[in-house]
Image (cartoon, rainbow, N blue to C red):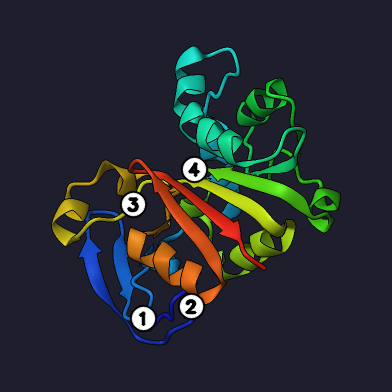
Amino acid sequence: MHSCPLCHNPTVTHYHSDKRRDYLQCDNCELVFVDPSQRLEANEEKAHYDLHENDPSDMGYRKFLSRIADPITERIQPNSHGLDFGCGPGPTLSLMLQERGHDIELYDIYYHPNQVVLEKAYDFMTATEVIEHLYEPDKVWQQWLNLVKPGGWIGLMTKMVIDKEAFATWHYKNDVTHVIFFSRRIFQYLAERDKLALEFIGNDVILLRKLQ
């Protein structure tokens, strides 16, 4: 049996199955995750991402990203230095934040694989529609904590699990690159464990402030 990829608890239970995949849940942190044996290979995953059409000139896409751009802008200082982690092939949030006067670096495992930017510390970092794709969320989460200075912000966007009944008909799980699913309870667990102040903005924006 598989252990939790986030907190490494060895006790996980069956949560749901559909025609393509089986989903497990950690008995400790409550993370829901796809059976690791049913994940895509890296080349298959990238081929799926290559189909995404994220265009900075698409006003609908900008409106979607404003759900995180607006609240994080309200909380950071002018001329802050940030990192957009998992920016994808058409970085747009970074442009929106640059237009507001901030200095933004880019990182993406496939499209902007510049490891140098991961060796710095930032006033804030963002990861929009990223966390649900992570095969090693424990390692990446620690990386995010190390990327942000004390007092800095981590801004995330992801859809969150509500319960088993809602999960059964949830479109979000049907994307084959979505392999882990967080809930409010999990973010509360991580915030308490890692000494972070936590705010939920709407249904899919999570803001965490590093307290020390």
Residue type at numbered disc 3: Met
25 left or right, relative to 105:
left
Q: Amino acid at mark 1?
A: Asn
Residue at figure coordinates x 44%, y 68% from the top left: 36
The residue most toward the left is 165
Circle 4 sits in a helix, a strand or a loop, which is it?
A: loop
Task: Name the residue tied to disc 3.
Answer: 160
Q: Secondary structure at mark 3?
A: loop
Q: Earlier in the sequence, mark 3 or mark 1?
A: 1
Closer to the chain start, of discs 2 and 1, is 2
180 shown above or below 193:
above
Circle 1 packing at 10 Å, graded few (<14), some (14-19), many (20+), is some
Q: Which residue is mark 1?
A: 28
Q: Nearer the viewer, residue 66 or 24?
A: 66
* Residue 57 drawn at (x, y percent): 58, 12
Tell me if 172 is positioned left or right of 141 in this view. Answer: left
Q: How many marks?
A: 4
In the foreground, 186 or 1: 186
Q: CA distance from mark 2 to mark 1?
A: 8 Å
The answer to whether marks 4 and 3 mark residues whose Cβ atoms lie closer than 8 Å is: no
| Marked residue nearer the N-terminal end (1 or 4) | 1
Question: What amino acid is found at the position of numbered circle 2 in the picture?
Answer: Cys
Res. 7 mark: 2
**Residue position for label 4:** 129
**Mark 4 crowd level (few <14, some 14–19, many ≥20, 10 Å Cα):** some
Label 3: few (<14), some (14–19) or many (≥20) C-alpha neighbours in 10 Å? some
CB atoms of marks 2 and 1 within 8 Å: yes
Q: CA distance from mark 4 to mark 3?
A: 11 Å
Is residue 173 or residue 59 the one in the foreground?
59
